[in-house]
Structure formats: structure tokens, C-alpha cells
Amino acid sequence: MSEPQRLALAVDVGGTKLAAGVVDEHGRLLERVSAPTVRTDDGAALFSSLAELVGRLAPYDRFAVCGTGCGGPMTAGGELVSPLNIGAWRSFPLREELARLTGLPTYVDNDAKALALAEGWVGAAVGFRNYLAMVVSTGIGGGIVLDGRLLEGDTGNAGHVGHMIVAVPGRPLPDHVTGVLEAEASGTAIAAHTGRPAAEATTAEIAEAGTHVGRAVGSIANVLDLRLAVVAGSVALGYGEPFFAAAQAEIDRICRLDHSRGAEIRPAGCGDEGPLIGAAAVGLRHLDVPLGILEAL
């Protein structure tokens, strides 16, 4: 008789949307629910909204683990999260609160690092031991895999590519250093600079956003000796081919070293399922579930 499949309760916390889902140990998203992120200054009220959403997937005893992706920065292990695009949570104990809610072993990591796990497991980076994964959406984040291992850094915050300088002097955006990628090419920045929703960007504005993303990717490829970037998020995937063409042109301009020449940017292979598959991977990797070529913890 075959072993029952281990299921992960996947939770994704974004500045625009909250989502939860059921993911199996093969990276298949079986169920999902979502709701807009509540606009509030009350951290407890925001968690209450998340708890109500997650509760739609009860009973929790069918799950082996809860994995969560959330915007950063955060302290090691996602114990305290302070997402830049969610002002209500500053040093919020997300892992502890979710564990109390569900009674499950619970793990939290940066949402873009979670995406990196998903893309190497069942997405566009399958078979690659070195790549960058990015989310270009309300904000911009990244996760970096080198030699088959997800980079962590001192506090688990490695990969914050949205805070690389890509423009001088650049344009101001509250709470950001002028000229960083997130202040130039995120949905928040595009809306602030144009006075229109990011979805209404002109052809020139789309190309400009793509160029800035390509500048960051090209620089990372030169520094870290990798040749693939996979990109998800409502801005990147919503803009589509013109965005990726502009990004690739800038990468080609920048990547002229032998080890980076030919570096490529691709749309993320998991599409809109990536955040939840990645969140599940954050939890499942702690149960020694194989995630493709990615090395175990």
C-alpha cells in the first residue's frame, strides 16, 4: 500500500493580495483561496483577515507542514517580519501566529526566495544549479540559487535585488533610497511616477521598467557567474514580451564577460501559481521532500 501524500498548507502574504493553498509533495497546487490585503494600520486586524482566509482550508490535520512566503525584510527564520509594502506589520511574529493558528510545524521565508524554490523545483529553472528568481510586482524582490543552494545571508535576507542602485540620480519614492530598482520599476513606483495605475503604463514606460530590471539582472550575472533569471509578478508578467525584450537587450549590453555572456531572462514557469508553490516548498524542504536539483538543507 502506497504512503499517503504529504500536503503543505501554503500561505502567501503580498502587499496587494493574500493567498493560501494546498500543495502536494510533487509541487501541484490542488486548492487555493485569495483575498485583497486589508488596508489597515492595525497589525492584529491584518492577521485576523489572513487567519480567516487560511481557515477556509481547514481542517489543518490533513497537512504535514505550513510554509509561508512574505515580503521582507525579516529576522532569521521569518520570526519577525517587516514587509516594506505592509506598514501594519513591523517586527510582527508571523511564524508564531500561524503556528498557533494551525498547530502545524510552520516555516516562513521571503516571498521571492520562495519563488526561487518553486522555479527550481517545477518551473523555468528546473535543471539549473545557478539562477536568479525575481518578483516584479507591488515591490521587487529576489532569491538567488548558487551551486544548487538557496542563498540565505546572515539573517536570511539575501537576494533583496529591489534595493540595487540602477539609476543615477534616479527618482524618489518614500522609504526608498533614490535610484534603487524598486523605486524605478515596481508597480508602486510606476504608479507614483506616472500618476496612473501601473497596468496603464505606456509602451515607453514598460520598456523603461524592463531596462531597469535588465540592468540589475546583468549586474548580478556578472558578479555571481550565473546565466539565468526567471521573473514573476503582476508587473513583469502583465507587461509581457515588451518588458522582457527590453530587459534582455540591457542584459546583452552589460553581460560581456566570458562567464556572463549569453545570460537570459525568462518569464517564471509557474505563472500565478508560483507564490503558493514556493510557499509550500519553504515548508516541505524542512521535511526532506526532494525539490529537484536543489540540495537539501
Image (tube, rainbow, N blue to C red):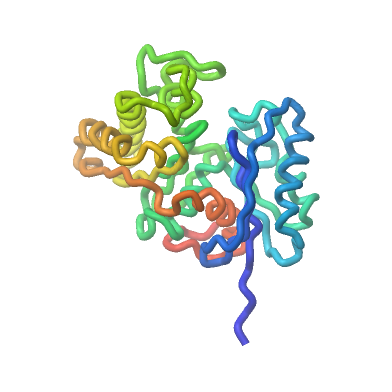
Q: Is residue 90 visible?
A: no
Viewed as shown, does residue 116 lie left or right of 250?
right
Question: Residue 276: x and y, percent?
Answer: 56, 52
Question: Which quadrant of the structure image shows residue 259?
Answer: top left
Tell me the residue at 78%/56% (across/down). 103
Quadrant into which the C terminus falls: bottom right
Total labels: the figure holds 0
Q: Is residue 142 above or below residue 124?
A: above
Q: Is residue 214 visible?
A: yes
Tell me the residue at 48%/26% (across/down). 197
Tell me the residue at 36%/50% (across/down). 130
Q: Is residue 225 above or below residue 174?
A: below
Q: Is residue 258 above or below residue 189?
A: below
Question: Which quadrant of the structure image shows residue 47?
Answer: top right
Viewed as shown, does residue 274 lie left or right of 209?
right
Task: In this rendered view, identify the residue nearer to me: 54 or 292.
Answer: 54
Question: Residue 108: x and y, percent?
Answer: 64, 46
Question: Which quadrant of the structure image shows residue 210?
Answer: top left
Tell me the residue at 44%/33% (across/down). 161
Quadrant into which the N terminus falls: bottom right
Viewed as shown, does residue 295 lie left or right of 61?
left
Question: Residue 181: x and y, percent?
Answer: 42, 26
As drawn, which residue projects farthest toward the bottom?
1
Question: Residue 237: x and y, percent?
Answer: 40, 41
